[in-house]
Image (tube, coloured by chain):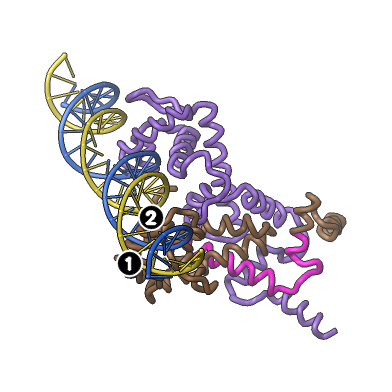
Chain colours: A purple, B brown, C blue, D yellow
Amino acid sequence: MVKQQVEREHTPSMEDYLEAIAMLRDANKAVRVSQISRRLKVRMPSVTSALEKLSEKGLVVHERYRYVELTPEGESVAEGVVHRHEALSRFFTEALDIDRKTAEEDACKIEHVISPLSLERMIKFIEFIQACPLEEPNFPKRYKYYLEHGQLPEECLARGLEKEER
Amino acid sequence: MVKQQVEREHTPSMEDYLEAIAMLRDANKAVRVSQISRRLKVRMPSVTSALEKLSEKGLVVHERYRYVELTPEGESVAEGVVHRHEALSRFFTEALDIDRKTAEEDACKIEHVISPLSLERMIKFIEFIQACPLEEPNFPKRYKYYLEHGQLPEECLARGLEKEER
DNA sequence: CATAATTGTTAGACAAGGCTAACAAATTTT
DNA sequence: AAAATTTGTTAGCCTTGTCTAACAATTATG
């Protein structure tokens, strides 16, 4: 992992906390230390100390023993993380046909390190394979066939032969 | 980054050191502390202390002030990292049409966290788009067209219309 | 070959981010 | 409302992985 030129604004850990807070809130769950702790599988003191850091950076509001809220800035950081997470998760499931669990796990890791360009391209990639109506069975289907059978589907081989016959 | 069930054997940092050592050696450069330091952009004392840890784990051989070598086990770990790196880098450049620099940077990060399944699928994906001779311009070309022009290439639209006309 | 330059190591500091144990506040139960 | 339970905090420790400063070994140079 050679150092990249642009330093990330927030650490993976801090991004995880922000993401968890946003997701708990969106799921209408009380955003409390215990909930965050459960979701991230860390102990409560870790949450308390993370919230302190996030407070100092102006990303969350947290009064002792009370609920947690995102500031507008924290909100926008969280939004970015969630957006990356979802794009990655969709890419893994829809483009690569990966099971949801693995897709989620990988998205959780990669969301902290992927470049904006690569992310954008994955999004464009999904758009493209969904928008292009060419061919039947279409691209994802043929790809899945290849995954399942270990060899190219009929129509690929057939066309390939055609060419060679010429 | 919710904790995954399977603990990684080695930390990203340790993987980076092993990868760097393997790559320096493959480039026929002397594998020395200074070289590793330059390549990973860390100071020499960091390298020294990393090598000490890797020694303890039986992954490298390093006598004070001397060259560094991988043990067979270190070799096989390094091989895995390099393999992941290359697969990712290829996927980014060949499937997503990302510039080499960005592809390399992303590969350097993601190589430490991606699941075996996702990696395998990316490899299969490249195999597939390269092996399937169907369509002209082929999949990657149409995708690139979409990237450059922001809209689907002619033949996608044409075929789409055909269908609607039926 | 003696000195200079380079390379490598040691010692020690520090930040991040986890943990446990002990205690305190808040909430629930009886 | 008092006691019990749950939730949250504090204090302090630990590991990883960096760094700088100072020193030591090695290698190159005049």
Viewer-proximal residue, D22 or A60? Answer: D22
Judge left or right: residue A12 versus residue A34.
right
Q: Secondary structure at mark 1?
A: helix
Image: A36 above or below D30: above
Residue B123 in magenta stretch: yes
Judge left or right: residue B69 versus residue A121.
left
Of labels 2 and 1, the one closer to you? 2
Mark 2 surroundings: few (<14), some (14-19) or many (≥20) residues within 10 A: few
Real-space CA distance between mark 2 and mark 1, rounded to the nearest whole angstrom:
15 Å
Q: Which residue is mark 1?
A: B55
Q: Secondary structure at mark 2?
A: helix
Viewer-proximal residue, C11 or B111? Answer: C11
Q: Position of residue B160 (x, y in %)?
A: 82, 57
Image: A139 above or below D10: below
Q: Residue at x 35, y 36 (%)?
A: A47
Q: What amino acid does circle 1 point to?
A: Ser
2 or 1: tag closer to the N-terminus: 2
Q: Which mark is residue B45?
A: 2
- Residue with the most extreme bottom position: A165
Q: Residue at x 62, y 58 (%)?
A: B103
What secondary structure characterizes most of the magenta part? helix
Q: Position of residue B92 (x, y in %)?
A: 63, 60
Stretch of the chain drawn in magenta = B115-143
Quarter occupied by residue A93: bottom right
Quarter occupied by residue A164: bottom right
Chain to which mark 2 belongs: B
Residue A141 in magenta stretch: no
Image: A49 above or below B6: above
Q: Residue at x 81, y 69 (%)?
A: B136
Residue B80 showing in the rendered view: no
